[in-house]
Structures are given as C-alpha cells and as structure tokens.
C-alpha cells in the first residue's frame, strides 16, 4: 500500500473517531443545546448517502468509516432530541 | 454522469453545508460549551488530511468539499476557543 492510500485511511480514521469523545461528553453532561439540530440532521443524511455510495461501490473503507460515523452521529442526534428543553 | 456519481456529489454537499447552520448558531448564541474540544481538533485534523489527499489526487470534488468543511469547522473550533469560559 502506497503512502497516499495510507494518508486516506488515516484521514478516515480521524474524521470517524472524532465523534467518540463528543458522544461521551454529551452522554455525561446531558446537554446538547449548543448543537444546531439542522446541522445534525443534514450531516446524518449526508453520511447515510455516503454509506449507500460505498455499498454500491463495494468500497470497504467508505462503508466502514461512514457506518461508524453514522452510528456515533445518530447517537448525538438522539441525545440532542432527548435533552431538548 | 451516472447516478452513482450524482449520489456521491449530493452526499458531499450534505456533509459539507451541514456545518453552515452550526456556524450561524454558534456565532449568534456565543456558546459552544457542549462541543467536545477533542472532537473539533480531531475532526479538523482529519478534514485537513482529506484535503491533502484530494490535492494529491487532483480530485476537485474531494478538494472542494474538504476545503469548505475545513473553513466552517475551523470557524467552529475558533469560536469554541474564544467562548471558552
């Protein structure tokens, strides 16, 4: 594997695991008022479309990265709705 | 252009413009305490790596999507730091 593919994989790992500390923080503080609901909904739709795109191309890195991102952002969206005052 | 490329472009537009309402909300409320600093830093690094990846491949959709995402998330990160109490 050449360095450009490694760069792409590292980039994918960063933009995917980034949301794990956010899930933990939101879960612990039970506060998500600073999040834009429009951002969360639009982002989740976009990641879902990326997942469909990856499934169609049978591209495992795209599938895995977007599946994990969708799960983590789905949790953040559900916490946002649950803690909405 | 076939439908799979259109799907990828639509997905890219969604995951990019998603952050615009977030920038507007954070700018207006001047509050970003619910955001995980670790998430913002990790995500910005990842998007920057995607940008380098796209520049190397000379792939305009990857370059454009990640450039706009980096600008918007860079603004959110800078607001998070500015409004940190």
Image (cartoon, coloured by chain):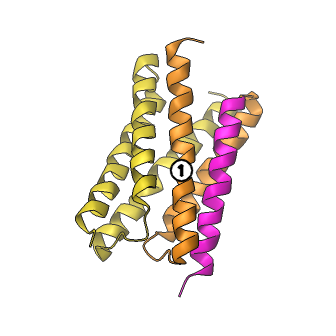
Chain colours: A orange, B yellow
Please, which chain is the residue tagged with disc 1 on?
A: B
Q: State left or right for residue A81 relative to residue B69.
A: right
The residue shown at (65%, 61%) is A74
Q: Is residue B41 above or below residue A53?
A: below
Residue A73 belongs to magenta span: yes
The residue shown at (52%, 30%) is A10
**Residue B74 position within the rendered picture, expressed as x and y whole percent measured from the top left:** 32, 49
Q: Which residue is mark 1?
A: B14
Q: State left or right for residue A68 relative to residue B10.
A: right
Mark 1: secondary structure: helix
Quadrant (top left/top right/bottom left/bottom right) for the N terminus of chain B: top right
Q: Is residue B42 above or below residue A25?
A: above
Image mark count: 1
Q: Is residue B22 above or below residue B49?
A: below
The residue shown at (54%, 54%) is A19
Q: Is residue B64 above or below residue B56?
A: below
Give whichever of B5, A1 is nearer the camera: A1
**Residue B21 position within the rendered picture, expressed as x and y whole percent measured from the top left:** 41, 64
Residue B52 belongs to magenta span: no
Neighbourhood count class around disc 1 (C-alpha, 10 Å): few under 14, some 14–19, many 20 upward: many
User: Magenta stretch?
Assistant: A60-85
**Residue B52 position within the rendered picture, expressed as x and y whole percent measured from the top left:** 40, 26
**Residue B53 position within the rendered picture, expressed as x and y whole percent measured from the top left:** 45, 24
Q: Main secondary structure of the magenta part?
A: helix
Q: Residue furthest top?
A: A2
Give whichever of A52, A20 is nearer the camera: A20
Give whichever of A29, A66 is nearer the camera: A29
Quadrant (top left/top right/bottom left/bottom right) for the C terminus of chain B: bottom left
The residue shown at (23%, 64%) is B82
Q: Residue furthest bottom?
A: A85
Q: Residue furthest left?
A: B82
Give whichever of B19, A64 is nearer the camera: A64
């Amino acid at each position: 594997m050449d360095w450009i593919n490694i760069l792409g994989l590292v980039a994918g790992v960063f933009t995917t695991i980034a949301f794990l500390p956010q899930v933990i923080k939101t879960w612990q503080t039970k506060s998500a008022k600073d999040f834009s609901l429009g951002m969360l909904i639009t982002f989740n739709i976009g990641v879902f479309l990326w997942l469909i795109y990856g499934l169609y191309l049978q591209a495992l890195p795209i599938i895995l990265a977007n599946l994990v991102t969708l799960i983590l952002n789905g949790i953040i969206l559900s916490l946002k709705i649950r803690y909405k005052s």
